[in-house]
Amino acid sequence: MAKFQKGNKIATGRPKGIPNKTTTELKETINKIVSITLDNYLEDIAKIRKEDPKKAMELSKGLIDYIMPKMTKVDISGELKHKVEKITIEIKNGNGTENNDN
């Protein structure tokens, strides 16, 4: 087998961003398994809840990480260059007129 030579334009390989075949097949298989499992999840968790509510909650809690990403703490620091002098709140009725009930 010939060695790869730098600058070879003939053998470009897999285009960037295209997953390899094995990865694609594995993801599809996992997706099918998860879909089947989720179809039965509510029924199964209801059965578990009757016997052990704490266990049912722990199982549900474990899935949250896969549904909602964890929030991260964000520190914002800086200096205010403008002083807030006045805030005005205007309340309008449904017809667009101002509410003058003071």
Image (cartoon, rainbow, N blue to C red):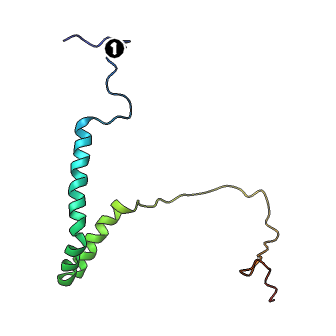
Instruction: Name the side, left or right, on which 77 lies relative to 56.
Output: right
Instruction: Name the side, left or right, on which 55 lies relative to 69.
Output: left
* 30 w.r.t. 39: above or below: above
Q: Residue at x 23, y 52 (%)?
A: 30
Secondary structure type for disc 1: loop
Instruction: Name the side, left or right, on which 53 lies relative to 17.
Output: left
**Residue 100: percent from the left, percent from the top?**
82, 86
**Residue 25: percent from the left, percent from the top?**
22, 42
Residue 46 appears in which quarter of the rendering? bottom left
Q: Residues within 10 Å of mark 1 (few under 14, many from 20)?
A: few
* 24 w.r.t. 2: above or below: below
Residue 38 appears in which quarter of the rendering? bottom left
Q: Quadrant of the N terminus?
A: top left
Q: How many marks?
A: 1
Instruction: Name the side, left or right, on which 82 lies relative to 54.
Output: right
Q: Which residue is mark 1?
A: 10
Q: Residue at x 56, y 58 (%)?
A: 75
Between 87 and 97, the residue placed more toward the observer is 97
* 24 w.r.t. 84: above or below: above
User: Type of residue at label 1?
Assistant: Ile
**Residue 82: percent from the left, percent from the top?**
79, 59
Q: Residue at x 21, y 63 (%)?
A: 37
Q: Which residue is outermost to the front? A: 95
Residue 59 appears in which quarter of the rendering? bottom left
